């Protein structure tokens, strides 16, 4: 059965339940704490029940530590806002850090703790890098331009901000712009380059050839539209970097003025392109900033190597650092304090991310259609197909699923768990048989699973009834786990209050010693698996303008 949904999907996960024992129909989140408030702004979203698993004001505050049943298996406590936070600093770090995903721009730095370079120091560092430190200008430019492109991609998604104009100057700053334009093309943007004062050196002519070979158009200043606001979503300002001096000469004086005049569109509430400045907002004094107050006001500044002094005057919402190539000798010599780059990222946000209007957060999903003739007849096969896609796409924990259960009183609760097996009989996961979800499942065997594969714009809901797996199955899986997880399962009394993390650590240590000879760790009685036998599937594929594709399939 097909349904083109014409309503917005609620991305904050919302679980609802009848008071009867019917399964939850909307689902999923690791946000918890049911609100009783009939005036909750969310209550109108549920046609069935005032009980919701998302709340803005906590009605339940626990005095101490909880052991948790989350996938991270870490102790958590309730924050003042009512959200569960990891309680150890290690856990907090891992919460903030980024692999190669989108968490990277959430790393918050204190701008006062960062070093800023003067013009002379910046030039000196450049010389050191390209002299005794063995770098070539090509290398540094490639890394610099790449980090500009990744910074842009962190904030301005190609689906919404597709049309890019890179305005490139005569020096290395312009070279960074050429490199960034090439990478943006590969990231799915549609760049156009304006490069009026070309430098006749092999490095630059090579960059031009590379861009031409990708059929990225070059536009002369004369061919640029007089009103840049209509044709572009992003303007990359790569005219001048740290060697700028004096006042801009033609044709850059006029180009800079065109960027300045875009502010008037903003004031008239018309959509205007965002300005991304590379290293220095062009025309600004490298140390003093926008001295007359009449210069470019970029929305994003990507500082390279280290921010220059003028960056202290940057007031736009997005300040990033790129150029992940600074060796310790430079850090020591210039006493540089720079933020660490998370994971494999080529850029890191400096300063706090801007306050976001939550109501304005939205993605325009661009995905292939979910065509009926291509869907597998058996929904379990279709699930496998999508699951394999999620694995192939390199998504982190594609087996993470929100499990929603409903207790005796009809109140839903959701948490993330990890899928550990799937076959024709259903979906299997393992947990503590004394946890809240276990209690709820023994009261009401109906449950719902929700998979969300961000990046593929896909979601799968699975509803059905749940039984414990056989003891042999649990035993077999238990002994396949790392020994540390086996010990953790013994120690962790889920959904109970413990006096503190130290108690868990102590018990863990004792068990570690007890089994240090490598002997078999017995599976505790309170630990085992569940299998949800699916009765209903819904496959959801996000599409543009909220015209999403859904495929329902019952499996009885
Ligand atoms: N180590 C690093 O941090 C790296 C930085 N990179 C990037 O390189 C720039 C600095 O590059 P550089 O070539 O030294 O200088 P600029 O790109 O800023 O510009 C120099 C050209 O601009 C002309 N210029 C200067 N002032 C004016 C003006 N008022 N009007 C017009 N033209 C001007 C200048 O001509 P002159 O005749 O005046 O000398 C030059 O032609 C840095 O900011 C980073 O973006 C590397 O890519 C990687 C390593
Ligand atoms: K610039």
Image (tube, rainbow, N blue to C red):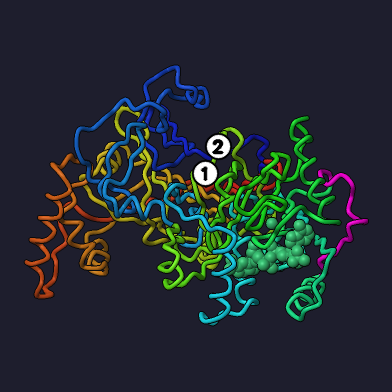
Q: Position of residue 234 (x, y in %)?
A: 73, 51
The answer to whether the residues at label 2 and label 1 have Cβ atoms under 8 Å apart is yes
Identify the mark at residue 131; answer none if there is no mark: none
| Residue 377, picture quadrant | bottom right
Q: Pointer 1: what residue?
A: 353
Q: Position of residue 95 (x, y in %)?
A: 38, 51
| Residue 378, picture quadrant | bottom right
What residue range appears in magenta?
Answer: 215-230
Majority secondary structure of the magenta segment?
loop
Report the front residue among 467 and 57. Answer: 57
Tell me if residue 411 comes above or below residue 429 in the rendering: above
Q: Position of residue 232 (x, y in %)?
A: 79, 49
Classify residue 169 as left or right of residue 280: right
- Label 1 crowding class (10 Å Cα cut-off): few <14, some 14-19, many 20+? some
Tell me if residue 27 comes above or below residue 380 in the rendering: above
Q: Quadrant of the N terminus?
A: top right
Element type where label 1 sits in the image: loop
Say whether residue 343 is visible. Answer: yes
Q: Quadrant of ligand 2?
A: bottom right
Report the front residue among 212 and 17. Answer: 212
Say whether residue 168 is visible. Answer: no
Farthest residue in the right direction?
222
Classify residue 270 as left or right of residue 360: right
Q: Pointer 2: what residue?
A: 356
């Amino acid at each position: 059965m097909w349904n083109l949904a014409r309503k917005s999907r609620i991305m904050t996960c919302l679980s609802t339940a009848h008071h009867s024992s019917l399964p939850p129909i909307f689902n999923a989140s690791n946000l918890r704490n049911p609100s009783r408030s009939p005036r909750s702004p969310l209550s109108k979203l549920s046609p069935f029940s005032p009980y919701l698993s998302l709340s803005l004001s906590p009605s339940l505050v626990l005095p101490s530590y909880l052991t948790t049943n989350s996938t991270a298996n870490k102790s958590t406590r309730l924050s003042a806002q009512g959200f569960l936070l990891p309680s150890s600093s290690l856990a907090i770090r891992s919460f903030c850090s980024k692999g190669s995903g989108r968490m990277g721009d959430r790393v918050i730095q204190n701008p006062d703790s960062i070093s800023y370079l003067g013009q002379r120091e910046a030039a000196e560092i450049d010389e050191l890098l390209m002299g005794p430190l063995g770098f070539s200008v090509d290398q540094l430019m490639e890394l610099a331009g790449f980090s500009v492109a990744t910074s842009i991609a962190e904030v301005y998604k190609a689906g919404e901000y597709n049309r890019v104009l890179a305005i490139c100057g005569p020096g290395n700053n312009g070279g960074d712009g050429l490199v960034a334009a090439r990478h943006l093309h590969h990231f799915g943007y549609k760049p156009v380059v304006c490069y009026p004062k070309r430098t006749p050196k092999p490095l630059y002519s090579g960059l031009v050839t590379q861009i031409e070979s990708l059929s990225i158009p070059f536009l002369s200043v004369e061919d640029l539209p007089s009103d840049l606001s209509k044709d572009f979503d992003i303007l990359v300002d790569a005219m001048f970097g740290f060697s700028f001096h004096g006042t801009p000469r033609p044709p850059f004086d006029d180009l800079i003025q065109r960027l300045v005049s875009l502010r008037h569109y903003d004031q008239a509430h018309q959509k205007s392109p965002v300005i991304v400045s590379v290293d220095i907002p062009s025309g600004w004094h490298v140390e003093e900033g926008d001295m007359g107050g009449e210069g470019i006001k970029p929305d994003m500044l990507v500082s390279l190597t280290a921010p220059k002094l003028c960056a202290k005057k940057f007031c736009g919402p997005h300040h990033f650092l790129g150029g992940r190539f600074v060796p310790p000798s430079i850090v020591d010599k210039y006493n540089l304090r720079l933020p660490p780059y998370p994971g494999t990222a080529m850029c890191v946000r400096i300063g706090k991310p801007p306050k976001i209007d939550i109501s304005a957060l939205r993605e325009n999903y661009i995905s292939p259609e979910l065509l009926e003739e291509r869907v597998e007849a058996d929904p379990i096969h279709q699930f496998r197909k999508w699951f394999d896609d999620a694995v192939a796409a390199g998504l982190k924990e594609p087996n993470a699923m929100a499990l929603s259960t409903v207790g005796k009183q009809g109140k839903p609760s959701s948490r993330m768990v990890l899928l550990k097996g799937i076959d024709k009989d259903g979906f299997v996961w393992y947990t503590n048989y004394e946890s809240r979800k276990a209690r709820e499942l023994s009261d009401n065997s109906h449950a719902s699973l929700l998979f969300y594969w961000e990046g593929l714009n896909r979601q799968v809901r699975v509803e059905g009834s749940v039984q414990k797996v056989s003891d042999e199955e649990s035993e077999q899986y238990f002994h396949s786990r790392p020994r540390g997880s086996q010990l953790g399962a013994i120690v962790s009394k889920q959904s109970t209050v413990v006096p503190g993390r130290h108690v868990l650590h102590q018990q863990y240590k004792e068990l570690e010693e007890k089994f240090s000879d490598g002997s078999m760790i017995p599976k505790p009685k309170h630990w085992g698996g569940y299998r949800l036998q699916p009765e209903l599937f819904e496959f959801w594929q996000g599409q543009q303008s909220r015209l999403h594709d859904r495929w329902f399939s019952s499996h009885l």
